[in-house]
Image: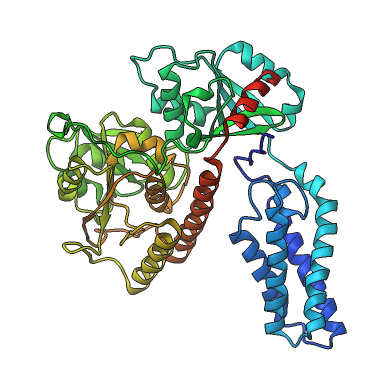
Amino acid sequence: MLGSLPRTRRSRGWWLIPAIDFACASAVLAVVALFDDSAIFPAVPIAPLLLVAACGILGVYGAQPSRGGFGEEGGPAWPVIRLMAAALFAWSASLLTDLTAGGQLAVWAGFVLLAMATNSFFGPRIRKLDRVERWVLVGEESTADRLKAYRPLQAHATLVCTVPPHQDPSKPADRAAALDIVDRYHADRVVIASSHADDESLLEVVRAFKSTGVPVSLLPRPLDLLDGPAATPSQVGGVPLIEVQALAARGSVPYAGPDRRRDRNTKVSVVVPAINEALNIGHVLSRLPDDLHEVILVDGNSDDETVEAARHAYPEIRVLTQNGRGKGDALRTGFAAVTGNLVVMLDADGSADPAEIPRFVEALEAGADFAKGSRFLEGGGSDDITVLRSLGNSVLSGTANVLHGTHFTDLCYGYNAFWARCLPFISLDAPGFEVETLINLRIAASGMKITEVPSYEANRMSGHSNLNTFRDGTRVLGTILTEARRRRGIQRAQPATTANQQEAKAAATTA
């Protein structure tokens, strides 16, 4: 059986299921407490909030509303998780008020029954709020016509653009053109279909669109383009798809061929996201080392003279304007435009020393895939980090290391460099400051070699930072948990059998 592909984005009513759970838990706890002659407060609202938080951390409130209910599609694990969360709710309530053993059991059973009934009633209505996905199809017009005519798909997705398949293997697919298509049509998913299943250029198209952060799926026909660990069978609206989960696996064999580093022509592209940094950007650019391939400034729609100051300090600079908001979106724009083979991420506020770039390049040329800056290695340091931020960084780094099996000493530092071939594995889709954490974790999950490089962080030269310790720390923690679930999901999907793949191919005639 083909699986069920999660929505790429939450529906408009994504918050309703947590709200229903909170209301049901509060009502049941209040009634049982009254009959048990126990105090309602502070058990309400603390225990119901803990229930909702636990379900959120465990992934119950995912992109598919069906996961929020008991006994609905999504596999037997979700009802079991909900039952365990209900038990945690009853136990936490007993700690906050004087419930008897019978009262605890009544809270657990009452919540399970009430939540099951309310989710069964509201579930179909919530699903009607689902946002129809916008698809870009890379393939022939005949395939597009069949997809448009397939009525079961219309409730789930609409085709907004058809792109002819790339036919010239000598010209790699353009990341900038892929990003332009995604942004212009506000695409939620790129679906690739072609009769040229063995064409290397199709794999280039997959890499190009994965680099922009948009989910990429294949119609079953070109399944042979990717190996088993990279693709899993699924479906949307009855249309069989192969979801491109990842483009690398941890079990890959290390390169053991000749050392070609001396012959490599390293072309360094420096990407500098900036918004209202007119007083700082000139100083940063003036300290860049020589012999760079290009410097790309991604302007976040500044209302000062950031662009003018950058061009004055570095006349050869390429200036781009991001379409969205946030550091992650700016990096996404800059990464898509790089033409070099080595990418350096550099902040515009003067905190990162441009003179350290050769140190990062040297680490990459020595054999690393990703060079990660660290303020906590010998030779590094910081004038800017506070005790609170240092403590938060330690907690977040430790959490990531435990959940992801990594050994980061400075997870949240954004001074990094990597080979441009890493971009499809990053698949950048985080808009804010959590982007650095996302990049680090996805590079680690791909099995690439990471080297930490000592780096010294200075104080911001002038102005105020857009970083908010608590808001962005929460986002980073959410990214760590989300990526852990994503990594486990990919690992579970990797042992896809040949029979499943053959069934997916046979179902291709549906579309």
What's the residue at 21%, 57% (across, down)?
455
Along the viewing direction, whichever of 222 and 320 lies nearer the viewer:
222
Q: From the viewer's perspective, tell me whether residue 197 is left or right of residue 157.
A: left
Residue 166: quarter of image? top left
Q: Dividing the image into 4 quarters, which one contains the N terminus?
A: top right
Q: Position of residue 91 (x, y in %)?
A: 69, 77
Drawn side of residue 410 relative to residue 330, left or right: left
Camera-side residue of 481 and 179:
481
Residue occupying image coordinates x 33% and y 14%: 170
- Residue at coordinates 76% horizontally, 69% vertically from top-left? 25
Would residue 121 be visible to someone looking at this image?
yes
**Image quadrant occupied by the C terminus:** top right
Residue 459 % position (x, y): 24, 62
Q: How is the image coloured?
A: rainbow
x and y, in percent, of residue 274 in the image: 33, 46
Left or right, 21 with reference to 343? right
Number of marks in picture: 0
Residue 457 image-quadrant placement: bottom left
* Residue at x 73%, y 85% (from the top left corner): 97
Residue 178: x %, y % from top left: 45, 26
Q: Residue furthest right?
A: 35
Q: Say left or right for 77 vs 377.
A: right
Q: Is residue 159 above or below residue 113?
A: above
Above/below status of 505 relative to 331:
above
Q: Is residue 187 visible?
A: no
Vertical comparison of 244 with 469: above or below: above
